[in-house]
Amino acid sequence: MILPALIIFLLAGGILAWSAEKINASYPKWIALAVLAIYLVVMGSLWSAENTTALTGGSWKVHFMKPWIPQFGVSFHLALDGLSLLMLLLTFFLGMAAVLISWKEIQNRVGFFYFNMLWVLAGISGVFLAMDLFLFYFFWEMMLIPMYFLIGIWGHENRRYAAYKFFIFTQASGLLMLLAVLGMYFVHGATAGEYTFDYFAWLGTPLSTQTGRWLMLGFLAAFIVKLPVVPFHSWLPDAHAEAPTAGSVILAGLLLKTGAYGLIRFVVPLFPEASHYFAPVLMGLGVLGILYGAILAFAQTDIKRLVAYTSVSHMGFVMLGVFAFNEVAMKGVVMQMITHGISTGALFILAGVLYERIHTRDINHMGGFWPQVPFMGTMGLVFAMASLGLPGLGNFVAEILTLLGAWQANHTLTILATVGLVAATAYSLRIVQKIFLGKPEHHYTLPDLSGREKLILVPLVVAIVWLGLFPQAVMQQVDQPAKAGTAQTQVTTSGLLVNQHVKGGEHDPK
């Protein structure tokens, strides 16, 4: 019952936070913080020594399944493996940071703000747990509405435009995925004689070449827009620029990761032939995103748009690694999902902290801040170095593993992707130089980080350093089980070696 309770109490916590505003305006944030802290502890307990052993190798050890709409083969099916556990830990960790950074920033409609925050986190958690594709689509769309409100109500000047753009891009691509889900439902039903939306039943469903490719493209549309992949990325900089700080943290740290998760969990295992067929194009789009995002990041003067374009660049490594089809690259992708969420979320928090003090995001109006705010400067330096992939920090491990794995698949694209690391050095150092070093363009009186802001950023520093020095803690969550020796087609995904010809087995929790 732990998995449905996780989602139910997030939803209930959101309703309680909204209602509690009538009693005291400070209650909603305390309720949101308490709910997320409890679930961070719960997920941490699952990562204890005993449970880590049970969850490694991609084994599905925690699951819940109840019929929902049995006449249509729909069930409330949730399952947890190592990948899901890592994503949920990231969700609640960054969720707490988002609550704390909003503590003073959000002053109007506080209860409704935390209601939307907890509901978007509930949708994200559902995406990472759902093993019924109808339920997965339900949670996928559920993320959309609360994020739309977070941007549209509490954002900056052009918030409505950014919210509409975010909604249109993600809703349209999500509808294409719905068509693909329904198509797979009917194809599987006609083949197996059982109409169901269950993920494990769909694994290994025989598909004709054309059918498999068209259905894959439907899933792919939703995931590459959410990731986002160039040229479907244009909603992201606008959404980040106009969103409140907490919205940017959740968007960059978590919502983008649902696109990467979808590629790993659904696209590659369900459509192995189509994935291999489109792999060169998709890896090429990944490299295009790495280079294009880095160039555009260097050209920005708005600090939030700059960090947004770095996300476009870093998510290109996800595309490159997923479709390299080897274990090393896949581990790099999972590390990239986690470390990017931490480092980029921290950069957006620092951008929000600066905006709160000087009321501008234009880096041309900044400069020479370090003497006044040395602690903030240190935090900025650490996360800028993480963004460029400095050895000793988690992002380096993620990118080097992705490149090593991609080299086995395509030398040329790997070399081009490596150029993106050089470009990352340029825009990361530009952040530090333009904000904290150099000659002051304007004379501001800045207070350094408060105790609350240090409480947010110091754990993020500890996490990114720890992941850089001890990455095995994450790696063991996505280790492969023993290699199967007889299957003709095997696809490595999320530490799980899925036999496309044999249903059941250890990957099926039922």
Image: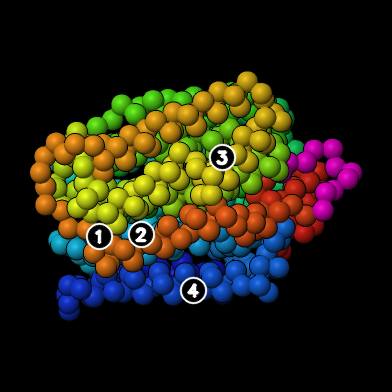
Residue found 69% across the figure and 51% down from its top: 495
Asked which secondary structure carries label 3, the reply is helix
Residue tagged by mark 2? 457
Q: Amino acid at mark 2?
A: Leu
Mark nearer the viewer, 1 or 4: 1
Which quadrant of the figure has residue 57?
A: bottom right
Q: Quadrant of the C terminus?
A: bottom right
Q: Between 390 and 348, which is closer to the camera in this rendering?
A: 390
User: What is the CA distance from the residue labelled 2 to the residue labelled 3?
Assistant: 23 Å
State how many labels appear.
4
Evaluate if marks 2 and 4 touch, with contact meaning CB atoms under 8 Å apart.
no
User: What is the CA distance from the residue labelled 1 to the residue labelled 4?
Assistant: 26 Å
User: What is the CA distance from the residue labelled 3 to the residue labelled 1?
Assistant: 30 Å
Mark 4 neighbour density, 10 Å: few (under 14) some (14–19) many (20 or more): some
Residue tagged by mark 3? 399
Evaluate if marks 3 and 1 touch, with contact meaning CB atoms under 8 Å apart.
no
**Label 1 or label 2, whichever comes before in sequence order:** 1
Q: Between 121 and 390, which is closer to the camera in this rendering?
A: 390
Q: Quadrant of the N terminus?
A: bottom right
Q: Mark on residue 41?
A: 4
**Label 3 or label 1, whichever comes before in sequence order:** 3
Image vertical order of residue 90 relative to residue 19, above or below: above
Q: Mark on residue 101?
A: none
Mark 1 neighbour density, 10 Å: few (under 14) some (14–19) many (20 or more): some
Q: Amino acid at mark 4?
A: Val
